[in-house]
């Protein structure tokens, strides 16, 4: 049976604080991330297209345990483990996102990158939950791990009741993966 891993990018494997500071200084956003009072003076679309612009990805720091988690996945049989990057970044930057992941040492052959079809026309929660639900329902994995820093997204995926393990960072993801390997006797 297949084993599936879904990994978010922003806030999960990379820290976009520098991009956030730039778009704040440029006037695209007022208020902290996650705040109900957050405002987008030039519109949310303009904010997203500037925050998530391909020329800014390199500014992010790679978060602790990200490389170790990806390296552990790399060691596993790619026919058994299917790894999906699942990001709310707009699909127009698909190639740049993949190149950034490669440059960080976070990409290996067999991975897949699923990007949001449009920055504004799709609700991130609905988009991610629907993608995960469809893939899990079609593949019936015996192990499924979702690595996502946003609690609201993890909670929504857990509400699907599909046996998905949802964790907020790569340290916990690495621990979950190593526990699964030990429990099932997988060779790594």
Image: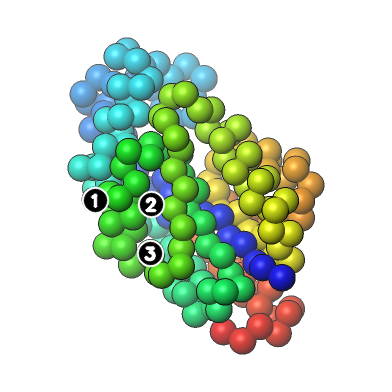
> Which element type, helix, strand or loop, lies under badge 2?
strand
Q: Which residue is mark 1?
A: 58
Q: Is residue 14 left or right of residue 82?
A: left
Mark 3 neighbour density, 10 Å: few (under 14) some (14–19) many (20 or more): many
Question: Compared to 97, does 73 lie above or below?
Answer: below
Q: Can the viewer see residue 65 in this picture? A: no
Mark number, residue 106: 3
Q: Position of residue 43 (x, y in %)?
A: 35, 15
Q: Is residue 86 visible?
A: yes
Q: Quadrant of residue 164?
A: bottom right
* Measured Cα–Cα span from mark 3 to mark 1: 13 Å
Total marks drawn? Answer: 3
**Mark linked to residue 14:** 2
Badge 2 density bin: few <14, some 14–19, many ≥20, Cα 10 Å:
many
x, y (%) of residue 138?
Answer: 70, 53
Q: Residue 180: give x, y in percent of width and height.
A: 69, 73
Which of the image's four quarters has the N terminus? bottom right
| Relative height, residue 80 to residue 149 (above, below) | below
Q: Residue at x 61, y 73 (%)?
A: 80
């Amino acid at each position: 049976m297949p084993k599936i891993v879904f990994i978010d990018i922003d806030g999960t494997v990379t820290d976009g604080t520098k991009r956030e500071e730039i778009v704040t200084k440029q006037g695209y956003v007022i208020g902290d991330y996650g705040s109900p009072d957050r405002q987008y003076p030039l519109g949310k679309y303009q904010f997203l297209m500037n925050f998530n612009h391909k020329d800014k990805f390199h500014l992010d720091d790679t978060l602790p345990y990200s490389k170790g988690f990806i390296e552990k996945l790399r060691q596993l049989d790619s026919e058994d483990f299917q790894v999906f990057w699942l990001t709310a970044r707009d699909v127009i930057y698909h190639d740049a996102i993949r190149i950034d992941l490669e440059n960080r040492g976070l990409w290996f052959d067999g991975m897949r990158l699923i990007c949001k079809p449009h920055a504004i026309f799709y609700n991130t929660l609905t988009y991610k939950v629907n993608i995960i639900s469809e893939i899990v329902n079609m593949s019936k994995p015996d192990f499924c791990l979702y690595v996502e820093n946003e609690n609201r997204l993890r909670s929504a995926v857990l509400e699907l009741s599909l046996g998905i393990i949802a964790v907020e960072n790569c340290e916990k993801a690495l621990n979950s993966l190593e526990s699964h390997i030990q429990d099932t006797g997988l060779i790594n």
